[in-house]
Image: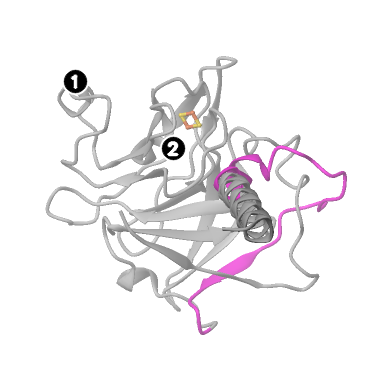
Amino acid sequence: MDLDDEKIDQGKRNFLKAMAVMSIAAAAGGAVKGVVSNVVTPSEGLTEFPEMTLVDSSGSPIKASNWPVNSPNIWLYYYPLTDDPNFLINLGDEKNAPLSISSSDVTIPANGSTFKSPGGVGPSNSIVSASAICQHLGCVPPIIHYYSPGNSIPGHPGLLQSYKPTSGLVHCNCHGSTYDPAKGFSVVTGPTAKPLPNVILKYNSAEDTLSVNSMTGPTIYGKVGDLSGGTPFPAGTTKTQMVNLGAV
Ligand code: FES
């Protein structure tokens, strides 16, 4: 190999090294984007919660009576701003029979205050919804998701026996926080000290459709207010689309 060949080879090696570092940086950026995107809070926002119908990918309202019980897929929609993902879960028992979910008083361990959860809606009063951003440090799906009844919770081997949840549980694998969706997404295990913010759903029984019109509980993680710190939907938007993240 002469000197020129050696220079070309060294150049190739440097180029490949640079590409490798850029790939890792890009991958790392992608991995944390979902976690940190809600932390920086721009000042613009809405003055009141919008009302939006939950629709499928073709823009048609989803039918509540068809919504899968204990779905193995992670279903999300964005509300109240375009950056805020929320779970929509039809809660059921171990045989996937829908469970009627009552309103309950939910404690926020961080400050000892309480709020009233909205309870379930739909033909069986079994559909609930909450922010999908973990209240501990902001991890997002799929690392936080719903575990249907009977599925053990990672890192908490005896939890199902000691806690005996009514339905499944939402668990975040970042650091082990667990929430009970049948009790207003209350805190079951830390390190989180706050429940997931509940979304208030409305059920139109004549049309069998669902809409969202406000939230209750703690503020969405990383924000100073539910209606600030992100990008509002365009004015006049009346629909928000369900997104399937796939099976877990
Ligand atoms: S971010 Fe969910 S447990 Fe820490």
From the image, tell me which residue sits under label 2: 184
The quadrant in which the N terminus is found is: bottom right
Q: CA distance from mark 1 to mark 2?
A: 19 Å
Element under label 1? helix
Query: Amino acid under label 2?
Result: Gly
**What span is in magenta?**
30-58
Q: Residue at x 55, y 39 (%)?
A: 197
Percent x, y of residue 247: 31, 59
The nearer-to-camera label among 1 and 2 is: 1
Asked if residue 61 lies in the magenta stretch, the reply is: no
Kindly check if marks 1 and 2 are in contact, taking CB atoms under 8 A apart as contact. Answer: no
Is most of the magenta stretch helix, strand or loop? Answer: loop
Rendered image: mark on residue 162 = 1
Q: Residue at x 84, y 44 (%)?
A: 42
> Splitting the image into 4 quarters, where does residue 221 fall?
top right
Asked if residue 48 lies in the magenta stretch, the reply is: yes
Q: Is residue 237 left or right of residue 161?
A: right
Rendered position, 212 above or below 167: below
Percent x, y of residue 203: 47, 64
Query: Amino acid under label 1?
Result: Ser
Percent x, y of residue 31: 55, 46
Q: Residue at x 18, y 48 (%)?
A: 93
Which of these two is toward me, 145 or 60?
A: 145
Element under label 2? loop
Within 10 Å of the Cα at label 2, are there few (<14), some (14-19), or many (20+) other Cα atoms?
Answer: many
Rendered position, 186 above or below 64: above
Whichever of callouts 1 and 2 sits on the residue coming sooner in the sequence is 1
